[in-house]
Amino acid sequence: MEDADLRILVAGATGALGSAVAVLAAERGARVVPAGRDPHRLEQVAGRLGSPAMLRFDAYDSDGCTRLAARAADRLGGLDAVLVTSGTVAFGPAERTSAVIEEHLMAVNALAPMAVLRGALAVIGSGGAVGAITAAIVDRPVKGMAAYQASKAALSAWLDAVRTEQGRNRISVLDARLPHMDTGLVDRAVAGTPPPTPPGADLPAWVAALLEGMISGASVLMPHPVHGAPTLRR
Ligand SMILES: NC(=O)c1ccc[n+]([C@@H]2O[C@H](COP(=O)([O-])OP(=O)(O)OC[C@H]3O[C@@H](n4cnc5c(N)ncnc54)[C@H](OP(=O)(O)O)[C@@H]3O)[C@@H](O)[C@H]2O)c1
């Protein structure tokens, strides 16, 4: 896949990371359909991208999530890639985390991305790519983030299984296990207060690696175990 030929849906393009990857893709010549929940931010990002369409979705509308890729394909005359960048976070030790918060994280961070990508698999042809941002925490637990980690690990496991299934269709499946970045996500937590966070990783470098991972058909994007730089695995 080449950047300039790419027709891509970014679900979560109203967020910090989603808008950054959508803008980078558009700058490189891709045709991008942004999808998001907040109508104002969605209009703003669609304007920056010069998009032919923008799509609203909410994580709790499972059917709407599943239909998203088909709607984007209608507008673009087909679709090569779908990337899910939506998500939310909560903090607190497991014994003080409510079932409501656990369900919310599972709905937004696991079930909704799965629904979007399930719909994408029915639309994207051979040689295409699907992917989602999980988190580096999947491999390295952090105290006070059990519910968040569990939701991201569920998505990561689903992506692993789907990658095995899609080998026959030549559709690549990217699990982007990103490290902490200063996007303001921790300040938008739906519960709890964040533990002391490490310095944020280099956002432009990770966003570039994320796009590269989608285009090159990589399986995993993760911090290098020694120096922490973005590392793509085939
Ligand atoms: N920032 C980090 O340090 C970091 C590290 C590892 C992984 N991640 C993951 O990267 C992704 C993006 O994070 P970010 O830092 O860019 O955060 P962000 O700026 O807060 O973006 C979050 C995105 O998720 C969307 N969203 C939240 N709840 C939703 C719902 N119920 N329905 C539909 N969309 C919903 C938001 O939509 P609206 O704005 O339209 O409401 C927004 O597009 C998340 O999955 C996060 O877990 C982030």
Image (tube, rainbow, N blue to C red):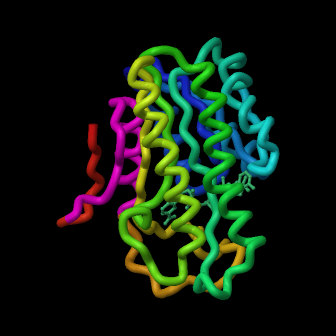
In this image, 133 relative to 61: left or right? Answer: left
At 61% from the left and 19% from the top, the residue drawn is 123
Q: Does residue 211 belong to the magenta stretch? A: yes
- For this orientation, the residue located farthest to the top is 77
- Using the image, determine if residue 227 lies above or below residue 171: below
* Foreground residue among 76 and 139: 139
| Residue located 60% across and 71% down the image | 147
Residue 109, compared with residue 78, is above or below; it is: below
Q: Which residues are magenta?
A: 202-225
When the figure is inspected, residue 204 is found, relative to residue 47, above or below; the finding is below
Image vertical order of residue 111 relative to residue 215, above or below = below
Q: Quadrant of residue 65?
A: top right
Q: Is residue 40 visible?
A: no
Closer to the camera in the image, 66 or 198: 66
- Image spot of residue 203 (x, y percent): 41, 59
Does residue 190 appear in this view? yes
